[in-house]
Amino acid sequence: RPDCGLAYMGGQAAFVYCSDEYFLEKPLMMISTWDGDEFSLGCYHRAMTMIEKDHEKFKELRKNFDKKLKDVLEKYPTNHIEIENGVGYFKGKIPHQLSQYLNSHKDAYLVCPSASSMKRFLEEF
């Protein structure tokens, strides 16, 4: 059983959960600093509803994205590719056309796309 976890929902909305061992009652458990919190939660709810409505279609999208991304990465000097089900990271040099779909951190590219990002990627590549 994990000690803690995080579910990022877009914007500034996220849920963080942890075991009693790491739970702190004070000083602060929730913060809302942005008027768009309700909008972010609404967007998350809409996205999850769409995924749950046709889960098989979403799994197929994720599978196609995963395969296409790995095929595309083979064309460039990349290494240490740790991607499964369309989520993970890799290291290497890639063109801007590809990097615009990814976030980078230190010397790695992070892969954690939304459904709409996966669709755009598949259309472009």
Image (spheres, helix red, strand yellow):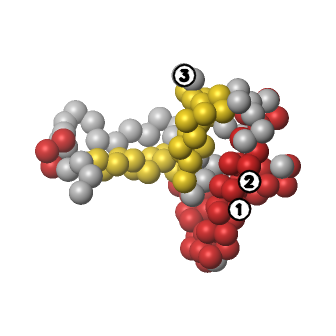
Q: Is residue 121 left or right of residue 79?
A: right
Q: Say which of marks 3 and 2 sits in front.
A: 2
- Bin the neighbour count of mark 3 within 10 Å (Cα to Cα): few under 14, some 14-19, many 20 and up: few
Depicted 54 relative to depicted 110: above or below: below
Q: Amino acid at mark 1?
A: Asn
Q: Residue furthest left?
A: 21
Q: Which residue is mark 1?
A: 64
- Bin the neighbour count of mark 1 within 10 Å (Cα to Cα): few under 14, some 14-19, many 20 and up: some
Determine whether the residue tagged by mark 2 lies in a helix, strand or loop: helix
Determine whether the residue tagged by mark 3 lies in a helix, strand or loop: loop
First in residue order: circle 3 vs circle 2? 2
Where is residue 15 drawn, in percent x and y?
A: 39, 50
Depicted 78 relative to depicted 7: above or below: above
Where is residue 56 drawn, in percent x and y?
A: 62, 76
Q: Is residue 25 left or right of residue 87?
A: left
Q: CA distance from mark 1 to mark 2?
A: 6 Å
Look at the numbered discs 1 and 2 and tell me whether their residues touch, using CB distance below 8 Å: yes
Q: Which residue is mark 2?
A: 68
Q: Residue at x 59, y 74 (%)?
A: 55
Nearer to me, 54 or 98? 98
Where is residue 77 drawn, in percent x and y?
A: 71, 30
- Bin the neighbour count of mark 2 within 10 Å (Cα to Cα): few under 14, some 14-19, many 20 and up: some
Q: Is residue 28 left or right of residue 87?
A: left
Q: Which residue is mark 3?
A: 106
Q: CA distance from mark 3 to mark 2?
A: 24 Å
Where is residue 78 drawn, in percent x and y?
A: 66, 33
Quadrant location of the N terminus in the rendered image: bottom left
Q: Amino acid at mark 2?
A: Lys
Nearer to me, 44 or 89? 89
